[in-house]
Image: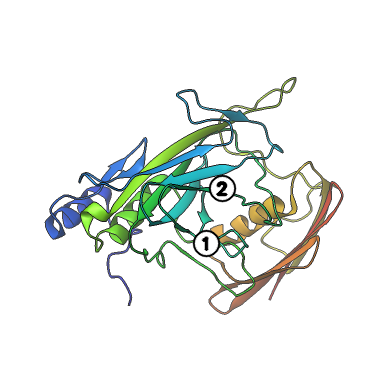
Amino acid sequence: MKNLLSPRTLSLSTLTALLASAAGAAPVISAQSIIVNPVQSSLTVKVWTDRGSGQQVPSYAPGERIRLYASVNQDAYVYLFNVDPQGRVDLILPNKYQGGANFLKANTTKVFPSPGDPFTFDVAAPYGLNKVLALASRTPLNLDQIASFKTQQNSFATVNVQGQERLAQALSIVVNPVEQSSWISDTAYYNVVARAGTVQPAPVQPAPIQPVPPRPAPLFTDPQWQTSFERRSTLENVYAEYAARLRAEGFTQVSRRQNGNHIQGEFRRGDRRASLEVKQKGSRFEVKITRR
């Protein structure tokens, strides 16, 4: 069923007022914790990184691997989101890998990636503070307006909202039909910092991709555009950067498939079509965009 309350059109104050009138106490949208249940619940959830859950925020350099942990004191469905310093939102759990189920038994701990998962979670720029939100509910939540698996081949869902405020607004709507005492949230933090001996850039927009040779025509004007470059990164991260550029132009990803070190995605915008191909050979990447 289509939800008439779109998080893209409602202001934060309007949304909060609507939720408050529909339920006794509206979820609290917090700059620090993203979303908080104002009603006391016996359900608890904790989230932390593999470098601890203490008061000091752990730091990671680009290219390092990170593991995330979540635990609950009662049987619950757990949803994990990562919000980077630029507001990009990634749905970490659930996913379609072996360890991607998000139902946790009481007093158990979930690790991402799970042992046996055929991938790693590699830290990447932008530099700054990342937030990992764990949202636990005794009943499954409908995240259709937040994220969706575009095709059967997609292992991770495509997130439809970007920015912490929009995520908080959308989650407020998602939990509104749920009994107030049956959900709870927790937030963990980690910093992405420059490696020792390197200079960390100012915390502004991420540095643009520098093709080799120098960039030809602008990225989104030629029917066919391609480039290649050397970089210490991952195939997934490079694909995500160019996919984000297409989304910024109004394209929506409709399919994605991966074969070894080759990812190909298909995008649509009305009657326009675009395909994105990214290939990796060691530290060298080849990117090709075809518009139709």
Tell how many labels.
Answer: 2
Q: Amino acid at mark 1?
A: Ala
The mark nearer the N terminus, 1 or 2, is 1
State the mark number for residue 111: 2
Residue at 73%, 23% in the rendered image:
198
Q: Indicate the position of residue 164 as horizontal and vertical percent values.
A: 41, 45
For label 1, the SS is loop
Q: How far apart are the alpha carbons under marks 1 and 2?
A: 11 Å
Give the colouring mode of the picture: rainbow
Compared to 203, does 227 lie above or below?
Answer: below
For this orientation, the residue located farthest to the bottom is: 271
Residue 263: give x, y in percent of width and height. 74, 64
- Mark 2 element type: strand
Q: Residues within 10 Å of mark 2 (few under 14, many from 20)?
A: some
- Image position of 281 (left or right of 254): right
Q: Quadrant of residue 227?
A: bottom right
At which x and y percent is residue 153? Answer: 64, 72
The quarter of the rendered structure image containing the C terminus is bottom right
Q: Is residue 79 left or right of residue 41?
A: right
Q: Label 2 sits on what residue type? A: Val
Q: Nearer the viewer, residue 108 or 173?
A: 108
Which residue is at the front of the view, 159 or 24?
A: 24
Q: Quadrant of the N terminus?
A: bottom left
Between 214 and 247, the residue placed more toward the observer is 247
Residue drawn 40% across the image and 65% down it: 145
> Disc 1 designates what residue?
101
Q: Which mark is residue 12?
A: none
Residue 116 placed where, x, y %?
69, 55
Residue 92, placed above or below residue 259:
above
